[in-house]
Image: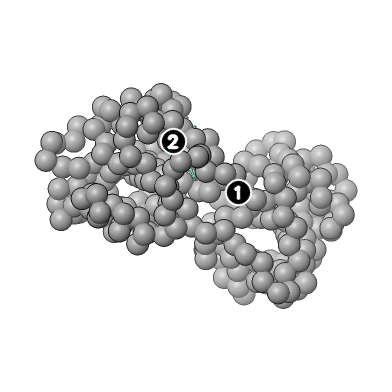
Amino acid sequence: MTPPDRRHLLILGGTTEARALAAALDGRAGLRVTSSLAGRVARPRLPAGEVRIGGFGGADGLADWLRAERVDTVVDATHPFAAVMSGNAAAAAAATGVPLLALRRPGWAAVPGDDWHRVPSLDAAAALLPALGRRVLLTSGRQGIGAFARLDGLHFVARSVDPPEPPLPAALDVLLERGPFTLDGERAVLREYRIDVLVTKDSGGAATAPKLTAARELGLPVVVVDRPPLPAGVPVAASVPEVLEQLAGRGLTGR
Ligand code: NAP
């Protein structure tokens, strides 16, 4: 329970930016900060300060939690593709009247020399792949790998933090790795596995961007899955400093 003299900020996390925000506010007087993680990753990088792990039980469960823990503001700092959680946050905020702010790092933009193919979904990426290459570096996360399971003529190299689960493509190498990744490392992966096409979500951010540079250097096509939209009406900040500024304006950064 939050004492009445402390404001309570809930950060919906699972991203670099969410950890940076928690670190920036950790230990401030007059402020309680709770970071929430889904519990998807076996050994998550934990943010500074108070952490809770596991789902809330849908929008209603989150709304109950916001009331019970007397939350003053929610920052949705989940990954741009965590659309269910973002939708639940918007619904719970509307139901409880607790203000919600979304932290979304900007998406990536193609530069001259890039051969990008933007698609609306992982299924659309899978449909396009056979026209672009035969040896695929799949960096779209272990949860969506099933979309590629039926592409029998292609060889996949899938990179993820934890092992992917079936259904899986028949020809598959798995690289269990967690970013950030370096440009030299990405060049090496593309060469070693003789990759001729890359698949990525438009996650944005610096930690996983070097693969895009490496693909450009080698002239490889990149299938970029577009972000799902944010729920309507949710204010958005593009960086941690921007969030801190907005929170300070509401007296929510402690002392
Ligand atoms: P999702 O599909 O949007 O959410 C599915 C369910 O997971 C939610 O309904 C919620 O369960 C629970 N959940 C998600 N994020 C949570 C959080 N921060 N705290 C507590 N519960 C959460 O989410 P997802 O795409 O699987 O992502 C899960 C987590 O991994 C998020 O924290 C996200 O930031 C991080 N992540 C995702 C991606 C990606 O590509 N999707 C990449 C990197 C990191 P209840 O309904 O029971 O509350």
> Could you say where residue 50 lies in the image, as x and y percent from the top left?
28, 44
Inspect this view and state whether residue 2 appears. yes
Query: Compared to 208, does 65 lie above or below?
Result: above
The quarter of the picture where residue 108 lies is bottom right
Tag 1: amino acid = Arg
Which residue in the protein does label 1 denote? 227
Number of other residues with Cα within 10 Å of mark 2, as a class: few under 14, some 14 to 19, many 20 or more: many
- What's the mark number on residue 197? none
Compared across the picture, whether 68 is left or right of 132 comes to: left
The quarter of the picture where residue 96 lies is top left
Q: Residue at x 45, y 27 (%)?
A: 58
Q: Specify which label sits upstream in the sequence, 2 or 1.
A: 2
Which residue in the protein does label 2 denote? 90
Number of other residues with Cα within 10 Å of mark 1, as a class: few under 14, some 14 to 19, many 20 or more: some
Compared across the picture, whether 58 is left or right of 107 comes to: left
Mark 1: which secondary structure?
loop
